[in-house]
Amino acid sequence: MARTTRERVISFINNRWLVFVVAMWIQSCAGIGYLFGSISPVIKSSLNYNQKQLSRLGVAKDLGDSVGFLAASLSEFLPLWAALLVGSLQNLVGYGWVWLIVTGRAPLLPLWAMCILIFVGNNGETYFNTATLVSGVQNFPKSRGPVVGILKGFAGLGGAILSQVYTMIHSSDRASLIFMVAVAPSVVVIPLMFFIRPVGGHRQIRSSDATSFTIIYSVCIILAAYLMAVMLVEDFIDLSHSIITAFTIVLFAILLVPIFIPIATSCFTTSTDPCDTLEEPLVQQGQDPGQSTPDRGPELILSEVEDEKPKEVDLLPALERHKRIAQLQAKLVQAAAEGAVRVKRRRGPHRGEEFTLTQALVKADFWLIFFSLLLGSGSGLTVIDNLGQMSQSLGYDNTHVFVSMISIWNFLGRIGGGYFSELIGRDYAYPRPVAIAVAQLVMSVGHIFFAYGWPGAMHIGTLLIGLGYGAHWAIVPATASELFGLKKFGALYNFLTLANPAGSLVFSGLIASSIYDREAENQAHGSMFNPDHVLRCQGSICYFLTSLIMSGFCLIAAALSMILVQRTKLVYTNLYGKTRS
């Protein structure tokens, strides 16, 4: 029976694909922190900062981007639109005040106060991230990898999108980019914030969902390729303003394409469509989030399977390994039912169940993720924050090109990381963290290119670091939700993001800035020409030692990720192995 217009409108408004598409648009404003490499040179020159002072602003920016406990707390008892509104206002106040100071419209503040303003402004991102990711994993509980990868990907691409808008504005005032960073998120988020909410997405499964994901992946690839092509054309050819405007209009047209998915699924299906009645469980085994019953034999028996499982089982092919574990589990369940085996009642949940943050903090798996993220993602963030100075030290004047490039590679890393880690986990029932280890090895090679400053090092290094760094933020949230559950996902995710500023504090605030200023002072002593008295370092020596140190720490991070892989094989076998048997 055909549905009425009112029913179609209601279906459209409550469509989980509409929430997802709007979340993608909002996330494109959640990556404004990646533009710090573009705005840092104007802040440095306007306020006469040295590299160490600028690095402190960068650490404050990273802290703001990662300290999301308030956002997580608000999202638990306030509607998600309220959290988005708070984030928009914080961003406007923080970066707006910075713009007033840089342009001389407000009095100069001490460094600590500037750090607070940067922190407040960038902390607005945590509200965007929390609201969109919470709604995403709740509406798509069985497609966490692709959903998280796409949403985090758009956050990474935000820098390139805003750079293109800035190019279209064609302002000679470099500080106008700071103004755009302050205003743009509010312009986008406030009109769209009421769409972001859980809509019972686990009851909206359709046979067309795979096609919908394919369309969105295709749009993502087209968007990245288009931005890369536009950036290169604008860099090498002197274009008229009308052509640049046309490029920007096409960019927004591409961003609008995914809205046709919820339109199609809402307006071109009937109420008798059998796909509308399909439902997927929110968590494994069909239990409600946080529910713990004494009769869950198969789940409680997991700890005994770990104890009784022969070590050689892990070396078997995937299908045979799943069968052996299932047989052992069945025997233990039967023995427990007959009283021959006492099922151990451990305190707290097991891997794959619902954890609170307090429960997760006492688990070795959680800290393995945290420190692996600190060393891997933290080193990548250091490159992003210092990209302006790195490109200038190697003789490049236009830092916007590399900021846009790393945003695009960051975007593709998040899309690709979510997609391939989903294949590894869902299709092969192998632990998702192995994809993190691969990303960290790729980053280690990227740091080597930056260290030696070979011809094309900026382009290749930006590619490898962007891909590897972006992959972290697609894989880690999905891994955390699989190992520690969805109920407290906001708090768990926001704690893990603290690894980012912690890594940035060590690599950028302590190591990179100290080495840069030391080399700049050595070069200044040997040169009589420095009219503006601003310390600048030239050559690959500026970041040589820093990049080698970060390359080594990426190798350590990969080793930590592989330890996590070994510890979680059974979890992924039980999560996804049964669907393949």
Image: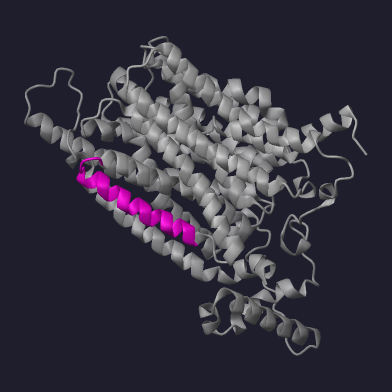
Residue 396 percent location from the top left of the image: 24, 29
Towards the viewer: 190 or 213: 213
Please tell me whether the stretch drawn in magenta is mainly helix, strand or loop.
helix
Q: Is residue 93 visible?
A: no
Total labels drawn: 0
Q: Is residue 25 magenta?
A: no
Which quadrant holds the N terminus?
Answer: top right
Position of 387 with respect to 223 (left or right) is left
Image position of 486 with respect to 35: above or below: below
Among all residues in the image, which is located at the extreme top? Answer: 105
Q: Residue at x 50, y 66 (%)?
A: 565
Residue 287 rendering spot, x and y as whole percentages = 78, 61
Q: Residue at x 40, y 60 (%)?
A: 558
Can residue 330 be seen in the rendering of this structure?
yes
| Quadrant in the rendering for residue 53 | top left
In the image, the segment drawn in magenta is: 434-456
Q: Quadrant of residue 522?
A: top left
Closer to the camera, 152 or 7?
7
Q: Residue at x 60, y 40 (%)?
A: 216
Placement of 504 over or under 167, stated as above or below: below
Left-right relation of 292 to 316: right
Magenta includes 446? yes
Q: Is residue 226 left or right of residue 465?
A: right
Query: x, y percentage for residue 384?
Result: 37, 38
Q: Quadrant of the C terminus?
A: bottom right
In this picture, is 567 found above or below 29?
below
* Residue 83 % position (x, y): 65, 32
- In the image shown, does 368 or 233 lie closer to the viewer? 233
Q: Residue at x 31, y 19 (%)?
A: 47
